[in-house]
Amino acid sequence: MPENRPTPSVTLRMLNPSAQLGVLTGAHDTFREVIDRQIATRTDLASVWSSFGRVAPTFYGSGHHWMSHPQQFADPWTILGYVAAAWPEAHLNSGFIQLPLFSPIDVAEKVVTIDRLARAGATFVVGLGWRPEEFAAAGTNVKYRVSRFEEIVETCRALWAGEEVPPGRHFTVAGRLGALPREDPTLVFGVQSPAAARRAARLADGLNVSWVMDHDSFRRINDAYREELHSLGRPAPRYWALSKFVSVDEDDARARARLDRMTTMFDWYSRATTWTSADVNVNIAREREAQDRTITGTAASVVEQLVPHATEFPYTDLLLTWLAPGTDPAENREHFAYLCESVVVPLLDELAVPAEARTLRI
């Protein structure tokens, strides 16, 4: 690896046909049963990688939305607390939490609690949110989302440092927290525009560009982040994710056939009222999905496509969501082994990651 680049880990997350945008996958599922299955599946898949490199158990939250019917989202804070107890060896990654829907004292207290529960630490990925009905339910308006977001971040930072904070535009928080985090919490901004990336460079510890982006939008947003970091003279971020969907198969036609699932994934997001065409293109035609957003093809082709994406920016994590063959666990496990051996190892070879540093997060 070049001296100015971090040694990236690789994260593999599975998407299969039964997966929905929320945690629950059926009308009779419970959150506990689903999360326990996820932990068991990830632990089993991690054992496959153990012959290739180091495993870093990581739990990724499912996302956060209120009033999401028919999608079935769990409260993200509660899920993190449960996983901290059920899977203590795992680092916790919250997934996208819509920060402006909460008060700063609520966020600050929850983060401290989870920090004290999580033995392997936690990363909190936060975003602006975009559904007006959710802001109305929180007693505010979506037009205030940026100013609320920034005030919450700044107030939380002060509270975590043990300081008192002056009254703000949206919130008045008097006094100090009763308990402080063990270390400075890692706040990663999930972003969907160059303006949000520049905000992340000013206020965040890292960046995770939303997976709904096409390649051009993804590049433009990461460029804005890098330029703003440079102009501010800020140090390299703690976390910077390459986030891509991948569909891999020994047969190119089978890999492309799985892209039909992406239509369902993006239907809900395409109805969002706060996208702008300059930032996001969620209405990618089926025949353009493989070219514009998802890395698709045979293993050798996917590696060839991934290398320029992985080297374009100094990422700390290559976050790959793989389209698994189906719902059969044995088939998915076999495909995962194929993915590790035929995609991840060659990718790390191309990136010149030394054997002792090859880390898989799952």
Image (cartoon, rainbow, N blue to C red):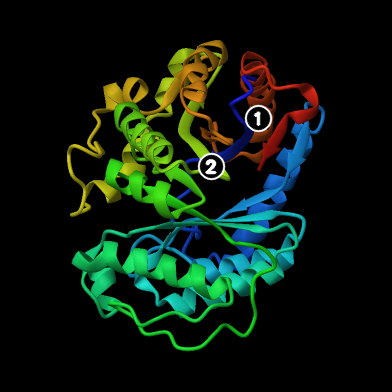
Which three-letter amino acid code belongs to the residue tagged 1?
Thr
| Residue 41 percent location from the top left of the image | 68, 47
The reply, left or right, for residue 118 in relation to residue 107 is right
The reply, left or right, for residue 293 in relation to residue 130 is right
Q: Nearer the viewer, mark 1 or mark 2?
A: 2
Q: Residues within 10 Å of mark 2 (few under 14, many from 20)?
A: few
Which three-letter amino acid code belongs to the residue tagged 2?
Pro
Q: Quadrant of residue 228?
A: top left
Front residue (pair 70, 110)? 110
| Residue 166 percent location from the top left of the image | 39, 81
The reply, left or right, for residue 306 in relation to residue 343 is left
Q: In the rendered view of the protein, which quadrant contains the N terminus?
A: top right
Residue depicted at 71% across the width and 47% down the height: 57
Which residue in the structure is indicated by mark 2? 235
Which residue in the structure is indicated by mark 1? 7
| Residue 249 percent location from the top left of the image | 54, 19
Q: Earlier in the sequence, mark 1 or mark 2?
A: 1
Front residue (pair 148, 260)? 148
- Does residue 30 lie above or below 22 as drawn? below
| Residue 83 percent location from the top left of the image | 66, 64
Front residue (pair 301, 324)? 301
- Does residue 252 lie above or below 156 as drawn? above
SS for callout 1: loop
Q: Quadrant of residue 85?
A: bottom right
Residue depicted at 35% across the width and 51% down the height: 199
Q: CA distance from mark 1 to mark 2?
A: 16 Å
